[in-house]
Amino acid sequence: MIAHRLSSKEVRKIAKTFSNCREIPTNKSSNTLSFLLATEPNPARIQIHCDTGTVITLRIFDKLVRHIFKHKCALRDVENIFRNPPELSVTKLDELQEKGKRASMSDGQMLDIGETILAAESEALKSHNHSIQKYREDLMPEKEYACSFPSCVMKEVDHILQSPSGKKGRITCAATNGNSAVFLYQHGHWKGTDGIPRKLSRKLLQHKSSPTYLSMGSKERYYASFEDGKKVWDGPQSMDFFFLKKPVHCVAFGRAVNDFIVVYEDGSWKHFGNMPSGLNKLLTENGRANNIDCITLGANNEYFVKDKDGQLWWGGVSTMMDQVFNEMTEHGKELQFVDFGCIEDSYFMMYT
């Protein structure tokens, strides 16, 4: 037995205790493990040769990739390297060069390192953008709500919105089919009334990640996305192609089971089945076809459209609903979102 052999299982156990560490897949036939550490100001790659106990830290210095070797490492040495990966300075580099130990790499290794560094920077950018988005949400004016449902649903919605947990954090997404409603909150929790489609309720309860977007329609149709990137939906098979085409931003379900519109992250949209009268023209005129932010539909030909510039349109609504919209405008309220249910004059509205 080699005296300085390291257990790959124990090394992985140590690596998992560091939140900024991610293992990079390597050749399964070798006993070498590779990890990327998101350290500041530059990431480090750690290669561990378990058979010999050699640990190599790879750093970018002076526009080149450098190797820093440590031989005959025990597990405590590995843990120390994960905690404080060695750095290179001009002085240290001069010492290495004098000893003839200057690091060199093949083109393949350079490409591999470059890819891992870009991956680390991408993850850091996503995290930074997420923090900025949360900060912007905190600065936004508090939203107010208006809604209309059958009395049994209305009672549940009032209870949710007035409960301590319902008041904790702002609502980021609301969905209704008229017979039920679901509310997603800023910090990841959600609340819903009775009557949510059973398959959707099961997904929301069982999935470990928080839901980030949700849409419901008549006939048990729904679409939901989660913070970990997973997406679930139920409805006609015609929906599948549209959801796999490009990253989805929102989904609107219409009157018939095959009526729906999908809005993509890039502002473009696609539809299947029938659309409310006048909506197709509205979505395509004045170059608006690739600038859509949100669409919702009702089962009675209602529609609501918001583009990325914040402009709003609605149509197909009853006289009562039209009056609600007009009163908001007259009182200087700024409408943010409205979703329609499949029961006449059922809706949930957010405004500031």
Image (tube, helix red, strand yellow):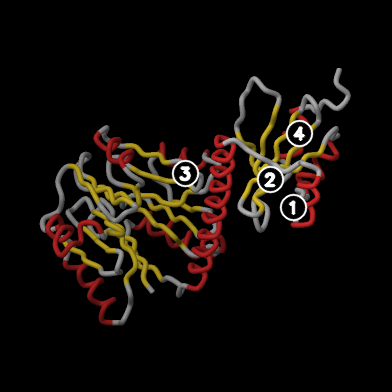
Q: Position of residue 106 (x, y in %)?
A: 59, 35
Whichever of labels 2 and 3 marks the residue nearer the N terminus, that label is: 2
Whichever of labels 4 and 3 marks the residue nearer the N terminus, that label is: 4
User: Farthest residue in the right direction?
Assistant: 3
Along the line of sight, the residue nearer the viewer: 335 or 183: 335
Q: Nearer the viewer, mark 1 or mark 4?
A: 1
Q: Which label belongs to residue 66?
A: 2
Q: CA distance from mark 1 to mark 2?
A: 8 Å
Quarter of the image with the N terminus is: top right
> Type of residue at label 3?
Gly
Whichever of labels 2 and 4 marks the residue nearer the N terminus, that label is: 4
Circles 1 and 2, Cβ within 8 Å, touching? The answer is: yes
Residue 20 visible within the image: no
Give the labeled residue for mark 3: 229
Q: CA distance from mark 2 to mark 3?
A: 35 Å
Rendered view: 25 above or below 156: above
> Type of residue at label 2?
Arg
Give the labeled residue for mark 4: 11
Q: Label 4: how many residues lie within 10 Å, few (<14), some (14-19) or many (20+)?
A: some
